[in-house]
């Protein structure tokens, strides 16, 4: 996942223990930086120290405390057992950003609810519940982006089987038709130099949500990333450049292939 967002310095909710049954709240700035680094993959101790710019002893203490809570783990380098490689051993559930609490647009929400109930109650009422909950979380500065993204990845695996094609053009056409058929929005896709630009108008995920100053379509990000990875059979870089929550009339995802030469 590579949606653009600021380096997280806000408390995280982390699930650990057997069957992810324990909830830990991480507030320490150093520990949050550690988790930010390890979210990108496994890291050697020396690389963590270099990235954090802290004393080895300080980093070591924080790593030990996170390991005691089973939030992270480590393994030895197979070529040199003195070297430790650290990794996340838990499920990062959410981040809580109290600084960015949002003013909720009550009138806009009321109109949305009224439209759903009067016009399409059977189809959209469950979506209304989902958006209402997420709006309230955003209003209070709580982002469930890790869970939402992972859900998108799982759903993307299923959707790929429905839209797969032997050609790029065929995949894009199938995906656009799928998006419109299930009222997920209206896709426009354009190849620009070495990047694919995917625009989604009337985005199902964020259109009814309150305005914020950052992109929030992590479900859609997970879906699109998974479908394109399966199609291209290679890793890709993808981020959301624009979002309807940023007062844009569409969401924009920019995709680049990481072709192995």
Image: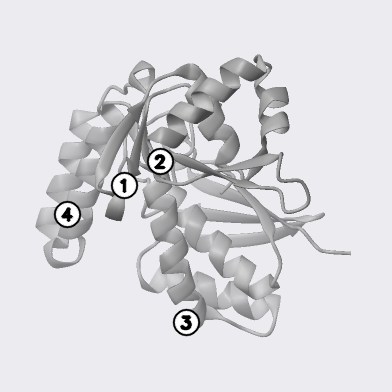
Can the viewer see residue 238?
yes
Which badge, 3 or 4, comes first in the chain's sequence? 4
The residues bearing labels 3 and 2 have C-alpha atoms spaced at a distance of 39 Å
Which badge, 2 or 4, comes first in the chain's sequence? 2
* Residue 196 to residue 6: above or below: below
Measuring 49% from the left and 29% from the top, which residue is drawn there? 64
Viewed as shown, does residue 213 lie left or right of 147? right
Q: Residues within 10 Å of mark 2 (few under 14, many from 20)?
A: some
The residues bearing labels 3 and 4 have C-alpha atoms spaced at a distance of 28 Å
* Residue 92, x across and y down, in percent: 40, 42
Marker disc for residue 70: 2
Q: Residues within 10 Å of mark 4 (few under 14, many from 20)?
A: some
Asked if labels 2 and 3 touch by Cβ distance under 8 angstroms, the answer is no
Q: Which residue is mark 4?
A: 116
The residues bearing labels 2 and 4 have C-alpha atoms spaced at a distance of 44 Å
Q: Which residue is mark 1?
A: 17
Asked which secondary structure carries label 4, the reply is helix
Q: Mark 1 or mark 3: which is in front?
A: 1
* Residue 227, x across and y down, in percent: 56, 69
* Residue 254 to residue 58: above or below: below
Within the image, what quadrant is residue 60 found in? top right
Q: Mark 2 or mark 4: which is in front?
A: 2
* Residue 136, x across and y down, in percent: 22, 34
| Colouring used for the render | one colour
Asked if labels 4 and 2 touch by Cβ distance under 8 angstroms, the answer is no
Which badge, 1 or 2, comes first in the chain's sequence? 1
Viewed as shown, does residue 177 lie left or right of 166? left
Q: Which residue is mark 3?
A: 162
Asked if labels 2 and 1 touch by Cβ distance under 8 angstroms, the answer is yes
Can the viewer see residue 185?
no
The residues bearing labels 1 and 3 have C-alpha atoms spaced at a distance of 36 Å
């Amino acid at each position: 996942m590579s949606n653009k967002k600021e380096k997280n310095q806000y408390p995280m909710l982390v699930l650990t223990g057997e069957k992810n049954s324990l909830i830990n709240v991480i507030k320490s700035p150093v520990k949050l930086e550690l988790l930010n680094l390890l979210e990108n993959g496994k890291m050697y101790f020396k690389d963590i120290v270099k990235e954090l710019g802290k004393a080895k002893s300080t980093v070591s203490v924080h790593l030990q405390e996170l390991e005691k809570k089973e939030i992270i783990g480590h393994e030895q380098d197979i070529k040199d057992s003195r070297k430790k490689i650290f990794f996340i051993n838990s499920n990062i559930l959410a981040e809580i950003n109290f600084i960015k609490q949002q003013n909720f647009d009550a009138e806009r929400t009321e109109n949305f609810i009224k439209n759903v109930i009067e016009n399409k109650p059977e189809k959209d009422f469950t979506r209304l519940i989902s958006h209402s909950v997420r709006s309230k979380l955003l209003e209070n500065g709580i982002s469930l982006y890790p869970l939402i993204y992972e859900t998108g990845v799982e759903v993307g695996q299923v959707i790929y089987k429905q839209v797969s094609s032997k050609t790029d053009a065929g995949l894009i056409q199938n995906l656009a038709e799928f998006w419109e058929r299930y009222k997920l929005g209206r896709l426009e896709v354009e190849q620009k130099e070495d990047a694919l630009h995917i625009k989604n108008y009337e985005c199902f995920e964020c259109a009814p949500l309150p305005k914020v100053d950052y992109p929030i379509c992590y479900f859609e990000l997970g879906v699109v990333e998974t479908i394109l990875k399966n199609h291209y059979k290679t890793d890709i870089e993808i981020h959301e450049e624009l979002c309807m929550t940023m007062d844009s009339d569409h969401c924009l995802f920019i995709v680049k292939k990481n072709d192995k030469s």
